[in-house]
Image (cartoon, helix red, strand yellow):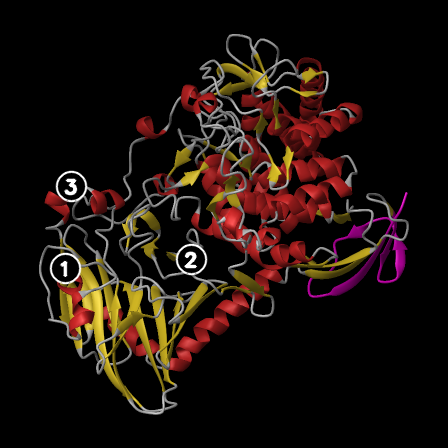
């Protein structure tokens, strides 16, 4: 069953049937202001922080689904009939009204055709302004004039998510509203600059600032009394719940189109006046769309592919990059799942995200790397979850302490001990730094001095050595890295136990660091860490191999996890993928391990995290044994580690298997299975329910998952084989043997490489010849910026 389709030309996903089984979301904004919105205009807006500076209110996991939102209502003043431009909240029967939604690159469009009136509402956030524009048009397709009114509605937040949801004896008396000169101003008295505004390009015929006056008691957004009556009362008050509602009355002639733009922004009434003046010139609104199109086209043009796999083309060229960018821009805590109760940067999440797209967003990736460096303790472990603001000196003197300002705790309270450290967190950062330098050529970053979370400072290079040394010291009785509070799997609480995945990740980080040390001619470190890497590899192969695959770890009581003799949790994806991806496994063991993954964990919807699912609680292994079978970390298709398996298969030279794995998880290929998948087919979800669950194949928690970045990374660097190195561009694809060719446009360090890959012998891996601008070469060196070069790669043995 299909609910929509990909519009390749406009780079939009068009939702033709809006009564979806779950919300399909989009993200508006690319800097400080973000709006998370779904196919019915439900959602919320925040400024910088989804926890401490929410602009509009949202009730996650509520009934009705995903309310409130940013709504525009229409009312026929002759018949008194009313509806919303987005299908919800009024919800006209879909056999009476035609609704569509188009999610694009940082904008969403809602279209409604009802009673011979066609209306559109486009939500968008300009690149350099902290405002959301609601661009509304109404066209009269009737043969007679129509007397209509437009009403807007959004509910203002009390800024802090906790204040929105509890302690109403305070919150209901801490915010006020006022109306003047066509502008609603929302004011929080406990913030020095706690203001938002709502205004429009045309003078309103009415307004409402109080939520309960607009909705009416015992009414909801579905049937607001203000719209039903066709008149707003002009309410304002100090205290209470507040909203942004403006009324505009029109008589529209046949074939006439009216256009009005509403503005929901950060700042006081003066800021609203400036923005209104700017966007009352509708050409400035049109320029917003042009600027965003240019913004995303520039990012996407850094790497464009043309392969025999249409799903891969669509996702890599547009949607997977978009998803990866959203994660880097806004971290993981702004969605309909993470609705603001947590905020800041997750260490392992941010480190991985910043590793995956330095080609399209080097500035933000470098910012994230620096923030993570500041969140590193001098012993070499990262703060699992932290606020970058903790390490920024705030010179502004605050006149009073506000509950919505990001707290500035002292160092003693923010620097947790080893018992609360996650063993994998900082190891990801090593490879993130190396990938960034390979992409940009900014070798000076290695010697940039950055502080530690617990005091003192060191170069970026020194930070990396601290990370590697920490993991080398934190080992258990067998020499395998300790799992500490958790490794990548937060539900595998090994405590004093050992993690196979972390030892393999340590080996991967070591080799990436060694490559950097070699290039920087730091021979003493090359020797030291090469010896350490050799030791880690030897220990891993000795202690972790179990006949057909690698075990997952060892509990603090010495019990091995994921052995061939286990009845539950017999085989795990993470340890086996990383044994191969890291290069630690021998080729023979690697082939056996990944064959076992295919045999025991592969499904039509992707690869299970482990199998069979745990059904008997075992606290020696961890909380994973108490998760319902087939959900999340216990036997689900956890999406994030799936691309590790794609990359591992590429390391083994098995392009057919890598592509089979890719296609299984690929949301594009589930566009006609929405009755099973339910979630959007343009973004990867955190997990898909596994075969031990009754809802096998159902996807949940979209967009904010490391799957976006890793899917992009594995597909482009391992499958298509485009790997920047320190002083040359490596191209070493691993593709299905049936592919006879593919093409990639790749910008690297300012030069454009038009890469044509030929596969005359039908191999899966191996490069026989490299041609640069028609000349046979050994490798592709760095080229001059602003030049274009033609590369021909001939695969073969």
Whether the magenta-drawn stretch holds residue 785 is answered as yes
Query: Spatial distance from mark 1 to mark 3, Cα to Cα?
Result: 19 Å
Pick whichever of labels 1 and 3 is earlier in the sequence: 3
Most frequent secondary structure within the magenta stretch: strand
Q: Is residue 785 left or right of residue 2?
A: right
Check whether the beta carbons of the residues at disc 2 and disc 1 lie within 8 A of each other. no
Choose the circle earlier in sequence order: 2 or 1.
2
Rendered image: mark on residue 167? 3
Magenta segment boundaries in residue numbering: 768-797
The residue singled out by tag 1 in the image is 212
Q: Name the residue carrying label 2.
A: 31
Residue situated in front as seen by the camera: 298 or 515 = 298
Say which element carries label 3. Answer: loop
Asked whether 431 or 699 is in front, the reply is: 699
Task: Give the mark nearer the N terminus: 3 vs 2.
Answer: 2
What is the quadrant of the N terminus in the image?
bottom right
Of marks 2 and 1, the one in the foreground: 1
Q: Mark 3 or 2, which is nearer the eye?
A: 3
Question: Residue 465 falls in which quadrant of the image?
Answer: top right
* Callout 2 crowding tier (Cα within 10 Å): few <14, some 14–19, many ≥20: some
């Amino acid at each position: 069953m299909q609910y929509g389709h990909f519009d390749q030309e406009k780079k939009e996903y068009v939702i033709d049937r809006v009564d979806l089984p779950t919300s399909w979301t989009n993200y508006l904004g690319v800097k400080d202001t973000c709006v998370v919105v779904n196919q019915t205009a439900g959602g919320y807006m925040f400024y910088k922080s989804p926890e401490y500076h929410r602009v509009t209110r949202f009730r996650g996991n509520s009934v009705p689904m995903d309310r409130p939102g940013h709504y525009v209502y229409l009312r026929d003043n002759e018949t008194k009939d009313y509806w919303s431009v987005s299908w919800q909240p009024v919800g006209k029967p879909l056999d009476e009204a035609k609704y569509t939604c188009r999610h694009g690159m940082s904008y969403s469009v809602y279209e409604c055709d009802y009673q011979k009136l066609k209306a559109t509402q486009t939500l968008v956030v300009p690149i350099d302004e902290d405002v959301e524009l609601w661009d509304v048009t109404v066209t009269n397709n009737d043969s007679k004039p129509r007397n209509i009114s437009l009403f807007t509605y959004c509910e203002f937040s009390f800024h802090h998510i906790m204040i929105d949801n509890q302690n109403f004896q305070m919150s209901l008396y801490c915010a006020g509203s006022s109306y003047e000169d066509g502008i609603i101003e929302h004011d929080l008295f406990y913030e020095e600059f706690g203001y938002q505004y709502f205004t429009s390009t045309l003078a309103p015929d009415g307004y409402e600032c109080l939520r309960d006056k607009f909705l009416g008691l015992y009414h909801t957004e579905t049937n607001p009394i203000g719209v039903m009556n066709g008149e707003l009362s002009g309410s304002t008050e100090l205290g209470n719940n507040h909203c942004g509602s403006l009324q505009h009355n029109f008589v529209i002639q046949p074939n006439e189109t009216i256009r009005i733009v509403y503005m929901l922004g950060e700042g006081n009434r003066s800021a609203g006046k400036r923005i209104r003046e700017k966007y009352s010139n509708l050409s400035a609104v049109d320029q917003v769309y042009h600027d965003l199109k240019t913004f995303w086209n520039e990012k996407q043009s850094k790497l464009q592919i043309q392969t025999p796999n249409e799903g891969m083309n669509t996702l890599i060229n547009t949607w997977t990059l978009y998803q990866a960018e959203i994660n880097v821009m806004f971290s993981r805590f702004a969605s309909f799942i993470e609705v603001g109760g947590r905020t800041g940067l997750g260490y392992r999440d941010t480190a991985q995200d910043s590793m995956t797209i330095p080609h399209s967003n080097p500035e933000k990736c470098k910012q994230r790397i620096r923030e993570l460096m500041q969140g590193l303790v001098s012993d070499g472990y990262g703060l699992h979850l932290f606020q970058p603001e903790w390490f920024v000196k705030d010179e502004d003197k605050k006149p009073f302490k506000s509950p919505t300002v990001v707290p500035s705790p002292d160092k003693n309270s923010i620097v947790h001990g080893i018992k609360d450290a996650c063993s994998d967190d900082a190891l990801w950062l090593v490879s993130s730094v190396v990938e960034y330098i390979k992409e940009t050529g900014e070798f000076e970053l290695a010697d940039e001095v950055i502080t530690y979370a617990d005091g003192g400072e060191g170069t970026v290079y020194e930070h990396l050595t601290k990370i590697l040394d920490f993991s080398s010291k934190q080992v258990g009785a067998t020499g395998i890295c300790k799992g500490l509070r958790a490794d990548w799997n937060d539900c595998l609480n090994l405590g004093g136990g050992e993690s196979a995945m972390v030892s393999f990740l340590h080996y991967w980080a070591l080799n990436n660091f060694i490559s950097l040390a070699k290039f920087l001619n730091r021979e003493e470190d090359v020797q030291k860490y090469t010896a350490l890497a050799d030791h880690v590899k030897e220990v891993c192969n000795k202690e972790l191999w179990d006949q057909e695959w690698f075990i997952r770890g060892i509990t603090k009581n010495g019990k091995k996890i994921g052995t061939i003799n286990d009845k539950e949790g017999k085989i795990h994806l993470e340890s086996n993928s990383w044994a191969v991806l890291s290069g630690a496994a021998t080729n023979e063991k690697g082939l056996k391990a990944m064959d076992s993954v295919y045999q025991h964990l592969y499904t039509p919807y992707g690869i299970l995290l482990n199998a069979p699912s745990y059904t008997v609680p075992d606290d020696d292994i961890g909380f994973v044994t108490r998760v319902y079978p087939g959900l999340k970390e216990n036997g689900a298709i956890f999406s994030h580690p799936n691309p590790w398996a794609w990359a591992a298969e590429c390391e083994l030279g098995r392009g057919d298997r890598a592509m089979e794995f890719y296609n299984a998880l690929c949301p594009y290929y589930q566009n006609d299975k929405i009755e099973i998948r339910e979630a959007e087919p343009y973004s990867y979800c955190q997990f898909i329910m596994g075969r031990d669950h009754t809802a096998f194949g159902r996807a949940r928690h979209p967009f904010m998952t490391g799957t976006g970045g890793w899917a992009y990374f594995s597909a482009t660097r391992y499958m298509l084989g485009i790997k920047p190195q320190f002083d040359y561009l490596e191209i070493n694809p691993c593709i299905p043997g049936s592919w006879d060719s593919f093409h990639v446009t790749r910008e690297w360090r300012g030069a454009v490489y038009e890469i044509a890959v030929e596969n005359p012998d039908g191999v899966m891996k191996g490069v026989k010849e490299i041609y640069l601008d028609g000349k046979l070469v050994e490798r592709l060196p760095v080229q001059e910026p602003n030049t274009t070069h033609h590369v021909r790669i001939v695969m073969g043995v």
